[in-house]
Image: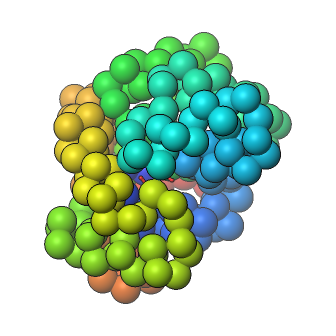
Amino acid sequence: MRIVLLGAPGSGKGTQAEMLKTELKIPHISTGDLLRAAVKAGTPLGLKAKAVMDAGQLVSDDIVLGMLEERLAQPDARAGFILDGYPRNLAQCEALQQLLERLQQPVDVALQLVVPGELIVERLAGRAAEQGRKDDTPETVRERLRVYAEQTAPVAGYYEQQGRLTVLDGVGELREVYQRILSALPRRAA
Ligand code: ADP
């Protein structure tokens, strides 16, 4: 199964994807994690991406696409994947569509986790305290939410037009939200 998870920063995509990957036995591919790994490893790509990420803006489409393409070429992704953090703008939607057409692995479903703005800000503040992620400072959080509203929110409309979008309430206990996700998955051929 090939799943795209959509939702604002702090909507719980990453946490839910981690739970889902065990159940479905498919990899969780987070472009944010891939970028943070490149930053940590100090690769040329990571050095380029770091300042952009710390400012809460989007890393350039070609860098992220190249990274994603490499990741999707790994054998474990042949069974399917849960994509988290990609696509993040309409150009990335088109790029993903083309890439997956080429691989003959179209997206089965896009799941959007909806969480109200006030709760998002609260959650990200909590995460800042716990994990100390550099892009969780109040100023950067504000910028990430602005970028999300401007560039990423339209991504849901892209999948809606294709009849592949399911919108889910992202408020509630982790387990509750997880159950909503499971019930929204297309039935797998037994
Ligand atoms: P969050 O879910 O909290 O937004 P992520 O871990 O998904 O955090 O992403 C962190 C940062 O990595 C983003 O703010 C952005 O700078 C960069 N990034 C991640 N995915 C993409 C993408 N698809 N395109 C461009 N930049 C990205």
- Residue 89: x and y in percent read 34, 30
Q: Residue at x 28, y 49 (%)?
A: 143
Q: Residue at x 45, y 74 (%)?
A: 128
Q: Can you name the residue that lies furthest to the right here?
A: 75
| Residue 190 found in image quarter | bottom right
Q: Is residue 116 left or right of residue 71?
A: left
Q: Residue at x 71, y 35 (%)?
A: 71
Between 2 and 39, the one lying in front of the other is 39
- Residue 154: x and y in percent read 22, 35
Q: Residue at x 70, y 58 (%)?
A: 25
Between 123 and 48, the one lying in front of the other is 48
- Residue 159: x and y in percent read 30, 34
User: Can residue 29 be seen here?
Assistant: no
| Residue 114 found in image quarter | bottom left
Question: Does residue 158 lie above or below 189 as drawn?
Answer: above
User: Can residue 54 be seen here?
Assistant: yes
Between 23 and 116, the one lying in front of the other is 116
Q: Is residue 172 left or right of residue 33?
A: left
| Residue 8 found in image quarter | bottom left
Location of the N terminus (image quadrant): top right
Q: Is residue 77 left or right of residue 51?
A: right
Q: How many numbered markers are drawn?
A: 0
Between 145 and 179, the one lying in front of the other is 145
- Residue 187: x and y in percent read 47, 54
